[in-house]
Amino acid sequence: MRTLKCLLMVLLAIAANNGVQGKSALPSFLKICSRSDPNLSRCIIDSVYQLRPLLAQGIPEFDIPPCEPLVIPEVTIDQGHGPISVKSCYRDIRVYGPSQFQIKGIRIELDKGTLQIKLFLPKLSVNAYYNMNGQIMMMPINGAGLSLGNYTNIDAILTMKARNIQKDEEIYFHIQDCTVDFNIGHAQLYFQNLFNGNKELGDAMNSFLNNNWKTVSSEIKPILEDRLAEIFKKFANKIFHKHPISVLFTE
Ligand SMILES: *[C@@H]1O[C@H](CO)[C@@H](O)[C@H](O)[C@H]1NC(C)=O
Ligand SMILES: *[C@@H]1O[C@H](CO)[C@@H](O)[C@H](O)[C@H]1NC(C)=O
């Protein structure tokens, strides 16, 4: 029972894109699966799907704002060496499509305190204001403006490891480690206003980036995975640190 509610909390937290100020009473829309359910993972997956539309529109009970689009204020990438050595900054990142996630599998190992979720995302569209300067595969690149991207057929694995912490006589759940591993099926990118608006150079660079999107994204992937893991961990802990286990996880 504890694990199931916890899982729902984690998924709520994953969908949160902003500060979460929890209230002490648990919301009634959390569908709890019974420990004796002969098909537990099925029940968990169903209850998460039941939450999916709520995540898209936002869940005031958790002060979770709408996650369509998911808004990430800023990501900075300072890639110093290798074929891609670029300093870039993305601001006001808007990600459309995260609420269309499909759950491919869930694995819980109670004794180790680990939770693993396999997700599939058919399509994410991302808009952001970018600023970059550096070299991509020996070619200089610089620019500032709007960047657009479509990413399709994304497989993602989210792994979290938790432990208990004690505070004021109560036991709280704490996500200690969180990792994200994703693979993109295909990417389409467009950077407006590259090279100070030089159309010829900008068009050439955009087609170069699209022809080499795999190389480009594999260089940047570890940084993005770390950043996403950090975000998930932060949001999950905002919820877990707010409610003691005795409130979150009754039998
Ligand atoms: C659980 O349910 C799913 C779909 O309803 C089914 O594919 C799976 O075989 C079931 N697993 C068990 C252990 O019954
Ligand atoms: C992303 O997809 C939309 C809809 O299919 C399309 O209009 C847009 O041009 C695409 N963006 C890029 C950067 O390819």
Image: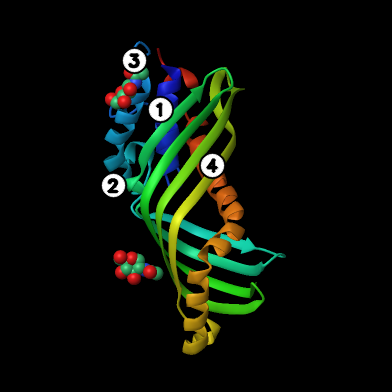
Which residue is under mark 3? Answer: 34
Nearest to N terminus: mark 1 or mark 4 = 1
Q: Residues within 10 Å of mark 3 (few under 14, many from 20)?
A: some
Image quarter in which the C terminus is found: top left
Tag in front: 1 or 4: 4
Q: How is the image coloured?
A: rainbow
Q: Nearer the viewer, residue 153 or 197?
A: 153
Which residue is under mark 4? Answer: 234
Q: Amino acid at mark 4?
A: Lys
Extreme residue in the right direction = 81
Q: Residues within 10 Å of mark 1 (few under 14, many from 20)?
A: few
Q: Provide the secondary structure element on which disc 2 rests.
A: helix
Tag in front: 1 or 3: 3
Pointer 1 with pointer 4, Cβ within 8 A: no
How far apart, in angstroms, are the residues tagged by discs 2 and 4?
A: 21 Å
Pointer 1 with pointer 3, Cβ within 8 A: no
Q: Amino acid at mark 2?
A: Gln
How far apart, in angstroms, are the residues tagged by discs 1 and 4?
A: 19 Å
Which residue is under mark 1? Answer: 24
Q: Amino acid at mark 1?
A: Ser
Q: Provide the secondary structure element on which disc 4 rests.
A: helix
Q: Provide the secondary structure element on which disc 3 rests.
A: loop
How far apart, in angstroms, are the residues tagged by discs 1 and 2?
A: 22 Å
Nearest to N terminus: mark 2 or mark 4 = 2
Nearest to N terminus: mark 1 or mark 3 = 1
